[in-house]
Image (cartoon, rainbow, N blue to C red):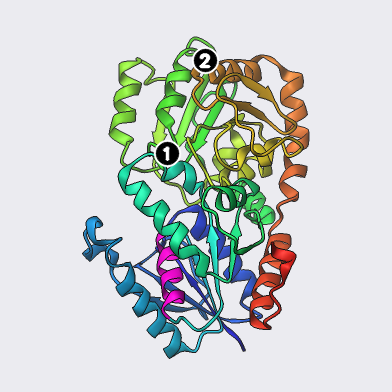
Amino acid sequence: MKKIAFFVNSFGGGGAEKNIKYLIDELIPYYEIHLIVFDDSYAYKLHPSVHRHLLYDEKKVPDIFKILLIPYWAYKLKLISNKLELNVVISFLIRPNLIASYSKKIGLKPPLIISERVSSYTLYSKSFSGLIVSSLIKRLYKYADIIIPNSLRIKYELEHFFRLKNKMTVIYNPVDIDNILQKSTKGDSLMDNNDNDTFTFINIGRLTDQKNQAFLINAFSKIKETKCRLLIIGEGPDKDKLIGTIKELEIESKVSIYPFQTNPYMFLKKANCFVLTSKYEGFPNVVLEALTCGIPVISTDCSSGPREILSPETDFKVSLKNGMEKAKYGLLVGLDDQEALTKAMLLVLSDSSLMDNYIQKATGRAKEFALKKQTLEFKEVIDKCLFNSIDNNYL
């Protein structure tokens, strides 16, 4: 049986890790699977046949050294690969991608697939440290055999801003529809003791500047007199700051922040509208999960992902800076337009026909990203690497 390895920071509670778990569960019958990480904590349960390897203990390395030590860790990855006699290495997220690419440069034998899952151009173009990372992407990603962006926008950025000429194929993130629908009916959610007549907006994600929940809280405060509430689920460094903003705006009775939930789907199922306010994304899983649960979505038109999900017939390179767009599968608002977000929330509160339209389309749109379909696309790329049949179809 051919040996493949997934290489990622950790197996914590992030979207990339969730997608790797999906892939591992589906690919177990076909390959011997290894998982290489920096952090040996696991938020998701792994199949018992998966072989685990710790490249290094991330908790013992100060942040300042994490870029400087890329060559050393690349060498260690090459040694592990040689020892295990791996047939394909697949890396996810920026640091593993850089390490794996450098490892390929210095002699990593098996084909390397890197999965780019965030708008690196947006993320790394506005600071000195970001410019260093951007330079490394340009210099190192070219050594990968195939790059798998998870959106058309990211593919465009890699080709046009980073000048990469690698073979690329876009594979969108999968959504496990059956699992989500099953879990959405289980357990008691934190919403059960609330008034069922109150319209519930919900946001799920890490409490960070990227996810921009402060933008959401401030927009929501403008409609605090209506019969609605806001539920935010997540952990992160911005938690205390967000709680302070809620108190300052005197909306403690209307806005609640709850910790990370292993089953967020029962909350989505009981909410009325999901709101994503990210400054940038790769391809937001949580939007697909909200659609699967049959609730309308409001999203900032950030790079990248939301437009490709909610308005697939439009130009993915377009991005609203201001205003609101009634897209085919949800509402898009300008990235910097708090007033537009407030307007969008008021619209779903008042326009029942619009709500019904989005509810009717939601699950059907989610099915276009079904897990089996995405897994088969990934397996096809892996098999092309295994049997040396990479061709220009990926260009």
- Say which of 180 and 198 sits in front: 180
Q: From the image, tell me which residue sits under label 2.
A: 339
Image location of residue 155, percent across then percent down: 61, 52
Image location of residue 77, percent across then percent down: 39, 78
Quick check: is 101 in the magenta stretch? yes
Secondary element at tag 1: loop
Q: Quadrant of residue 346?
A: top right
Which class describes the residues within 10 Å of circle 2: few (<14), some (14-19), or many (20+)? some
Image location of residue 196, percent across then percent down: 58, 25
Indicate whether 101 appears above or below 366: below
What residue is at 38 percent from the left and 53 percent from the top? 133
Q: Quadrant of residue 199?
A: top right
What residue is at 47 percent from the left and 48 percent from the top? 120
Q: Quadrant of residue 75?
A: bottom left
Image location of residue 300, percent across then percent down: 56, 30
Query: Which numbered circle lies on residue 210?
Result: 1
Quick check: is 103 in the magenta stretch? yes
Secondary element at tag 2: helix
Task: Give, as a single range, the part of the protein colored magenta.
Answer: 94-106
- Say which of 296 and 301 sits in front: 301
